[in-house]
Image (cartoon, rainbow, N blue to C red):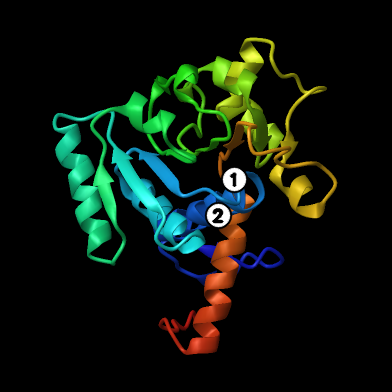
Amino acid sequence: MLVDPATGVPRAIIDGNYVTAIRTSAALAMGLKYLARADAQTALIVGTGVQAEAQARALDWWRPGIELVAFEPFGPRPQDMAADLCTRLADSGIACRPAGSLAREASAADIIVTTTPATKPVLLAEYLPQGVHVNAMGADTAGKQEHEVDALRRARVVVDDWAQAGRLGECQHAVAAGLFTDADHPHAIGEIIAGTAAGRADSNEITLFDATGPALQDLAAAELAIRLAGERGLGRVISLD
């Protein structure tokens, strides 16, 4: 439920999970725009759930026809789950193939997106090739971890919000290891967009975007959804009288 911040009166009832999925995929697109190599052609998605599908669609929007590969590290039938994701994407005209080896596919990827609920590293630092961009989307609460701290040591790390990423994102483990502190921490993507901080330095640099999903982004996306619905005559008006 979205409410008026001044009065507390409800403005709209919205499918929050759907808005969050779209907003998170938009965050991925920002990571790609400002941190991925301009000549990136291949992308590996680790995970096969709702967010993995949303990220795959964002990748195809960012670069239509990009070569997509899916890998599922968990579950009773990981290969089948990766194949199922590729089938769902194919129904929308997006080509994808399931990966057989995480190490092999990661070492050949220009972009890697991780979207798992892992609590210990799934993607090892040694898998990362020079020039790769990583969108780390899975760690969004205390205890979650998809990447080794050594991966963050090797990469230029960018966060969406340090106060959150340092406690809940991949960076929480780098903080525990002494790599980052509140006084010496990665820049935020907003600083790069605003031009007050540098993004990718060169084509060989490894970049990693630690995206934890600040609630403010959900509110902004919900506000946009309401405005567009009003402009297009969509939704249903409910009287509170």
Residue that numbered label 2 is attached to: 29
Quick check: 81 above or below 27? above
Q: Is 26 above or below relative to 126?
A: below
Task: Give the residue drawn at x 70%, y 38%.
Answer: 202
Q: Residues within 10 Å of mark 1 (few under 14, many from 20)?
A: many
The answer to whether 29 appears left or right of 112 in the picture is right
Which x, y percent locates residue 141? Answer: 50, 30
**In the rendered picture of this protein, how many numbered marks are placed on residues?**
2
**Mark drawn on residue 212:** none
Q: Which residue is mark 1?
A: 36
Residue at x 55%, y 27% (from the top left corner): 170
Residue 122 appears at what percent x and percent y?
39, 23
Question: Which amino acid is tagged 1?
Answer: Ala
- Residue 72 at x, y percent in the picture: 27, 34
Residue at the spot x=63%, y=10% of the render?
Answer: 177
Answer with left or right where residue 126 lies relative to residue 149.
left
Q: Quadrant of residue 35?
A: top right
Q: Nearer the viewer, residue 115 or 60?
A: 60
| Residue 115 found in image quarter | top left
Picture coordinates of residue 240, whole percent (x, y): 49, 79
Q: Amino acid at mark 2?
A: Ala
Q: Earlier in the sequence, mark 2 or mark 1?
A: 2
